[in-house]
Image: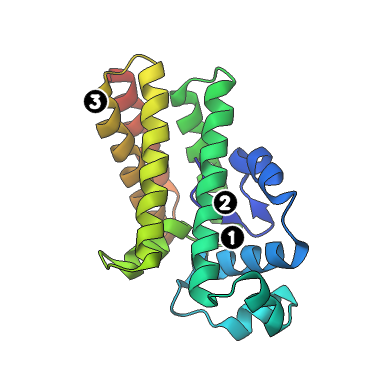
Amino acid sequence: MMLFVSNDGVARAATAGAATQDASVHPTRLRLLQVATRLFQQRGYHAVGLAEILALAEAPKGSLYHHFPGGKPELAEACITRIAASTLSALDEASGSGADIIGFLRQLGAESCAWLERTDWRDGSLLAVIGQEQGGGDTALADAVRIAYQRIEMRLAKWLMLEGVAVARARDIAATIIAAHEGAMLLARCRRDTAPVTLTTDMLCAMVDRG
């Protein structure tokens, strides 16, 4: 489960799924998605302008509206959809390989810590950053974040049920995993310290083991 991407693509746990997902994407569209995602992760949706996205993506303004007729809002929705798809692909790949979810959470925690340090604490979780800005608003962007989180929660719950967790309990644990991990990432960025992620990972693994 990777709710963020690194500066050079999707973080390692989701690399295979992202590579498959991006293979058929037009190069200009992909550059716009990668650049916009990174900027949104760092500063949020409202603090990033189209001119900056276009300059870093080395794309003319016309190409943005060719690939994203709705402009910046449509681009942001596409970024959310892309990261959700890569996260779901990572979950499918891990669960399908026979890996246990506790081992996956350990891997997620380790890679999250490494990623935060590698980006010098600049980048946050895309869904969390945009979701916090949108709040409980009734907008297309807020809906995109809600749907992304719901899909990831359902996929986690499915994996938990396959490992023997009761249906009702699986949904609760899945929601807790997402909430705790996203919160730990935020706290780690604020403190410039990976300890919150490490501690949260330990607590989540213990919770899943008991479940």
What numbered label is drawn on residue 169?
A: 3
Q: Quadrant of residue 198?
A: top left
Which mark lies nearer to you, 1 or 3? 3
Disc 3 element:
helix
Going by the numbered disc 1, the residue's amino acid type is Thr
Q: Quadrant of residue 160?
A: top left
Marks 3 and 2, how far apart at CA: 31 Å
Residue 156 rendering spot, x and y as whole percentages: 40, 32
Instruction: Decide if residue 24 is in sight here.
Output: yes
- Residue furthest top in the image: 164
Going by the numbered disc 2, the residue's amino acid type is Trp
Identify the residue at image location x=36%, y=39%: 153
61 vs 33: above or below = below
User: Which of the marked residues, 3 or 2, is nearer the chain's N terminus?
Assistant: 2
Disc 2 element:
helix
Residue 38 rendering spot, x and y as whole percentages: 58, 65
According to the picture, the residue beneath numbered tag 2 turns out to be 115
Marks 2 and 1, how far apart at CA: 6 Å
- Residue furthest left in the image: 168
User: Which of the marked residues, 1 or 3, is nearer the chain's N terminus?
Assistant: 1
Residue 145 rendering spot, x and y as whole percentages: 39, 57
Query: Could you tell me if the residues under marks 2 and 1 are in contact, i.e. CB atoms within 8 Å?
Result: yes
Which mark lies nearer to you, 3 or 2? 3
Disc 1 element:
loop
What numbered label is drawn on residue 119?
A: 1
Residue 96 rendering spot, x and y as whole percentages: 56, 22
169 vs 192: above or below = above
Marks 1 and 3, how far apart at CA: 35 Å
Going by the numbered disc 3, the residue's amino acid type is Arg
* Left or right of residue 106, residue 133 in this image: left
